Amino acid sequence: MRFFLMATKTRIKILCIVGTSIIALTNHTTCWHARALSLPPHLQKAVARGLLVQPHGRPDVFVLGTVHVGSESAEEASLLIETVRPSTVVVEVAPSRLPLIRKRNKENESNNKRKAVAAATIGETDLPQSRDYAARRASSSTVQFQTALRSLPALAQKGWTTGGVGGLIFSIAILWGSLLKRSLTAAEESDALPRTDEFAAAIAAADEIGSTVVPADMEIDELIGSIARSMTAPADWISLGKNVVMESLGAREADPIRRRRDESLLGWAERRRDVATSRASRAHGEAMAPCISRVLVDERDGMFAESCVGALRSRGGGDRTGDVIVCVVGLVHVDGVVERLETLLDIR
């Protein structure tokens, strides 16, 4: 009889513990669901479009995919961080760039304050209508083009010293080519779709609320070196150069992420914000230059995911309010980062 009573009491204690745990888990889950449902309409649209994703079973992790054109991605990064108030923000920025971005953020903040004071005093708020606007616009475009030209020798030297022939080809064909194309459209972008750096915006928003910022990207030397090491055979270098030339001449289908001929800037930006475009671009890179794609996309996916896992581990996996991780990366990385996070977090 005594044994039966003791066993019964033990069962009751176990049931109480299990019941308490279920209630706590339910409350915790409900809390996170409430957080998800409280996202502003703009972020809910980002979720619907696949730009803002949470790994399965991890409502405390947000991965935001961005595009490097216009300012909408910057607005989404700032709004997400202001809304969920994360403990850590992981960004697609190399560590050496973080202090430079913070310095520029402070300078921009000071300049904006001065402009606001001047506008209130003078009454001139519409800067594009000022008499010297056209001259300043043309000057800015020319400066960016000249800067791109001047950067060629430095990029070529860095590519050669860091990665030999492979590094040289990558630095000229990919890195410098991107700088040159951007300089040629700078004036049009400043008129129709002014650019705001989404990573700088994310860092500014994180600093504003006291979040830890984790710069998770490769340094440029490390990137060039990894690319060069991945191109182990001369055939790899020849294939890369051939593909770049053929795409430039229109003899081969270009990367889907590129702006099409006669496509408006706004139309291009809208197409860039389509997950299907980023996935097609990723597939194009894997087919045209698999060695480079493995470094530019796959390897960096892993770095961003590992940084998120490291942030989760450093906080002890706690469930305190505000213990959220936000990861801000280019849209092409979202699928890979989420997939790796789900794998890594399952293992742990």
Image (cartoon, grey):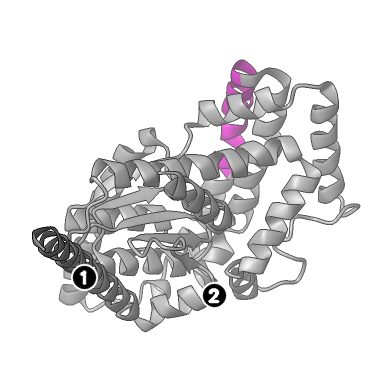
> Is residue 94 or residue 161 the one in the foreground?
94
Which residues are drawn in magenta?
A: 146-162
Q: Quadrant of residue 94?
A: top left
For the residue marked with disc 1, what is the amino acid? Answer: Gly
**At x 73% / y 60%, what residue is drawn?**
256
Q: Earlier in the sequence, mark 1 or mark 2?
A: 1
x, y percent for residue 204:
27, 55
Extreme residue toward the bottom, this view = 41
Residue bearing the label numbered 1: 19
Residue 91 percent across, percent down from the top left: 39, 49
In terms of image quadrants, where is residue 255? bottom right
Identify which residue is drawn at 19% across, 57% down.
208
Whether residue 233 can be seen here:
yes
Closer mark to the observer between disc 1 and disc 2:
1
Is residue 147 within the magenta segment?
A: yes
Classify mark 1: residues with Cα within 10 Å, few (<14), some (14-19) or many (20+). Answer: few
The percent position of residue 112, horizontal first and vertical second, equals 25, 62
Q: How many marks?
A: 2
The residue that mark 2 highlights is 49
Q: Is residue 213 left or right of residue 223?
A: left
Q: Say which quadrant the N terminus sits in.
A: bottom left
Residue in the image at 59% along x and 24% along y: 225
Q: Is residue 42 above or below residue 56?
A: below
How much space separates mark 1 and mark 2, taking CA atoms?
A: 38 Å
